[in-house]
C-alpha cells in the first residue's frame, strides 16, 4: 500500500487546494486522532478537502488506485469508521461554511460542519436545525444515519429535515438529489449512512426557536423502578413539546448534590420543554415528582446553551464502547434487568441511556426514508466510557452481558449511529425490509464498495463473480 499511497500523494499534489498530511507532516498526529480513543489508526495520507472539487480529486485518485478510503466529518463514529491504517482519509474539517436564508427558513451547509457550526449560524436568525445533543459531533455522520436529539419529538429526525444533498459518488461524479431528482438516492441518504458517496452539501429546513425550559433532577436508587414505570406511562401521552431522557449511572462526588446521592447509583432525568413555559409547567412538575427535591434544577436556557451543556461529558480520546436497541414497551422484567445492570456498572462515565422518541419522528412512515421503522418509541444505548486499556475487558464485557440479557425483550432493529465496529452482522437488522432497496441503490452508485468504512450495505456482486463462485462449488 505504501507505494500506492505515495503515488496518490504525488498525483493529488497538483491541483488539490487543501492540506495533504502524511506521517511526519506537521499536523498529522493531531489530524489522525478520532473521538473514540479505542481506535488509534495511522492513515497513509489525510486529504483535508476545501471544496467539492478537492473531494472529487481525492475520490477519483483513490478509486483508480484501489486505496482503502475513510471519510471524516466530525470523527465521532463510535465504531471508528472515519479512519484506517495505511489508506486515505478524506477529511472535511476545513469545509464548515453555513449559509442561512432566514426569510425562507432554510440553510445550506458543508459536509464538514460540526453540530455547533450549524447551531451558531442558524441561531443568529433565531432558527434551529434539529440535530444531536453534543455540539462537537459531526453533522454529516449524524444526519446520514438519522439524527436524534432534544428536538426530535417536535420537529422529527435530522434526516427528516434535509431537502437536498449534493454528493461526490464513487465514480467522482457530483450528484444532487432531492424528492424529485435522483429520488432513490435521496431516500437512501436519509438513514443509510455514508454508503453512497461523500456529501459535500446539505440543504435543510429550519424552525424558529431561541430558548427552551430545561429541568434536571436525580432519583435515588430505591425509587428508580417507580420512576421508570412512571416514565413509560407518562411519555405515551406526553405533548410533542416534551423530551424526557433518563440516564442510569453513578452520581458524581459533588458538594452541590444531596449527600445521600453522592457516588451512588441514580437515575438522572433531563427534560426539555420546547413550547410556552407556562403551558409546560404542569407536565414538568409531574415528571420530576420522583426526583430528589434538592437535586432539581429548573431554568430557561438558550438553545445554544442546551446544545453545548453535555460537551464536556464526552471528551475526545477516552475509550468508548456501545450497544443499542429499541423497545416497543419497557416491561417490568426489563426494568429489573436495567436495575441489575446499574448495580454492576463498572465506572463513573459509563451509563445506560434511555430516550423516548415518538412525536414528529413517528409520524414519518417506515417506507419514506431508509432510516425506517419509528414505531418502537423506546431507544436504549449502553455506553461504556473509561480511560485505561487494561479495563477494556471489564467495560466491554459489562455492555455485552447486559445487552444480551435485555435483547430478548427488544424489537428487532438498531440505530446505525449507536452501533460499535464489531456489529456488522446487525446492519441488515437495522434496515430490515428496506435492505434490498438499499442494496440496489448501493449497487448502482457504488458497485465496487469503494465507500466500505461505514455500517456497510455491500453491493450485489457482479454477475461474473457470481458465476465464478457457483462454478467453484
Ligand atoms: C459524543 C457523541 C454524542 C452523540 N450524540 C448523538 C445524538 O445526540 N444523536 C444522534 O443521533 N447521534 C449521536 N451520536 C452518534 C453520531 O450520530 C455518530 O457517531 C455519527 O456517525 C457522528 O458523525 P461524525 O460526522 O462526527 O462521524 P465521522 O466519524 O466523521 O463519520 C461517521 C460515518 O459517517 C461517514 N461520513 C462522515 N461524513 C460524511 C460525508 N460528508 N459524506 C458521507 N459520509 C460521511 C463516515 O465515513 C463514517 O462512516 C453521538 C456520538 C458521539 C460520539
Image (cartoon, grey):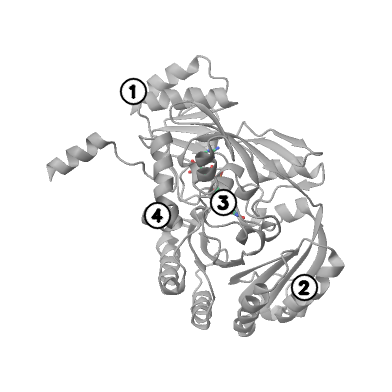
Identify the secondary structure beneath mark 4. helix
- Give residue 3's mark: 1
Task: Please state which of the two labelled residues, at mark 2 or mark 1, is closer to the viewer.
Answer: 2
Q: How far is mark 1 from mark 4, CA to CA? A: 36 Å
Identify the secondary structure beneath mark 3. loop
Identify the secondary structure beneath mark 1. helix
Identify the residue at image location x=53%, y=30%.
175
- Give residue 146's mark: 3
Task: Please state which of the two labelled residues, at mark 1 or mark 4, is closer to the viewer.
Answer: 4
Q: Which badge, 1 or 4, comes first in the chain's sequence?
A: 1
The residue at label 4 has a CB less than 8 Å from ligand 1: no
State whether residue 315 appears in this view: yes
Q: How far is mark 2 from mark 4, CA to CA? A: 39 Å
Q: How far is mark 2 from mark 1, CA to CA? A: 62 Å
Q: Which badge, 2 or 3, comes first in the chain's sequence?
A: 3
Q: Which badge, 4 or 3, comes first in the chain's sequence?
A: 3
Amino acid at each position: 500500500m505504501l507505494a500506492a499511497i505515495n503515488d496518490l500523494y504525488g498525483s493529488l499534489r497538483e491541483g488539490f487546494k487543501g492540506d495533504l498530511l502524511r506521517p511526519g507532516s506537521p499536523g498529522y498526529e493531531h489530524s489522525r486522532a478520532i473521538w473514540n480513543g479505542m481506535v488509534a489508526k495511522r492513515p497513509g495520507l489525510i486529504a483535508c478537502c476545501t471544496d467539492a472539487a478537492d473531494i472529487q480529486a481525492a475520490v477519483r485518485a483513490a478509486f483508480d488506485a484501489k486505496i482503502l478510503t475513510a471519510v471524516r466529518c466530525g470523527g465521532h463514529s463510535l465504531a471508528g469508521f472515519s479512519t484506517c491504517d495505511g489508506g486515505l482519509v478524506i477529511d472535511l474539517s476545513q469545509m464548515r461554511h453555513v449559509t442561512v436564508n432566514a426569510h425562507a427558513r432554510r440553510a445550506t451547509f458543508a459536509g464538514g460542519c460540526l453540530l455547533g457550526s450549524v447551531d451558531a449560524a442558524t441561531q443568529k436568525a433565531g432558527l434551529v436545525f434539529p440535530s444531536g445533543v453534543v455540539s462537537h459531533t459531526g453533522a454529516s455522520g449524524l444526519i446520514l444515519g438519522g439524527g436524534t436529539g432534544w428536538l426530535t419529538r417536535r420537529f422529527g429526525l435530522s434526516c427528516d429535515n434535509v431537502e437536498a444533498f449534493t454528493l461526490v459518488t464513487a465514480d467522482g461524479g457530483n450528484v444532487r438529489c432531492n424528492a424529485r431528482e435522483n429520488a432513490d438516492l435521496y431516500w437512501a441518504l436519509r438513514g443509510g449512512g455514508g454508503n453512497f458517496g461523500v456529501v459535500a452539501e446539505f440543504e435543510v429546513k429550519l424552525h424558529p426557536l431561541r430558548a427552551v425550559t430545561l429541568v434536571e433532577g436525580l432519583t435515588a436508587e430505591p425509587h428508580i423502578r417507580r420512576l421508570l414505570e412512571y416514565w413509560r406511562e407518562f411519555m405515551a401521552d406526553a405533548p410533542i413539546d416534551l423530551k424526557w431522557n433518563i440516564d442510569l449511572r453513578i452520581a458524581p462526588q459533588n458538594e452541590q448534590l444531596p449527600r445521600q446521592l453522592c457516588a451512588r447509583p441514580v437515575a438522572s432525568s433531563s427534560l426539555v420543554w420546547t413550547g410556552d413555559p407556562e403551558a409546560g409547567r404542569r407536565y414538568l412538575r409531574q415528571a420530576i415528582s420522583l426526583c430528589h427535591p434538592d437535586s432539581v434544577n429548573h431554568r430557561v436556557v438558550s438553545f445554544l446553551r442546551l446544545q453545548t451543556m453535555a460537551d464536556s461529558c464526552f471528551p475526545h480520546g477516552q475509550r468508548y464502547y456501545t450497544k443499542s436497541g429499541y423497545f416497543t414497551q419497557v416491561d417490568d422484567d426489563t426494568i429489573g434487568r436495567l436495575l441489575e445492570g446499574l448495580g454492576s456498572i463498572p465506572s463513573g462515565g459509563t451509563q445506560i441511556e434511555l430516550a423516548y422518541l415518538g412525536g414528529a419522528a413517528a409520524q414519518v412512515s417506515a417506507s419514506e426514508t431508509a432510516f425506517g421503522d419509528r414505531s418502537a418509541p423506546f431507544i436504549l444505548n449502553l455506553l461504556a466510557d473509561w480511560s485505561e486499556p487494561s479495563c477494556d475487558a471489564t467495560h466491554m464485557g459489562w455492555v455485552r452481558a447486559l445487552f444480551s440479557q435485555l435483547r430478548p425483550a427488544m424489537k428487532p432493529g438498531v440505530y446505525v449511529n449507536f452501533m460499535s465496529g464489531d456489529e456488522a452482522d446487525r446492519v441488515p437488522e437495522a434496515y430490515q425490509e428496506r435492505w434490498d432497496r438499499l442494496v440496489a441503490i448501493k449497487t448502482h452508485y457504488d458497485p465496487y464498495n469503494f465507500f466500505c468504512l461505514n455500517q456497510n450495505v455491500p453491493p450485489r456482486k457482479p454477475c461474473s463473480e457470481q458465476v465464478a463462485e457457483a462454478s467453484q462449488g
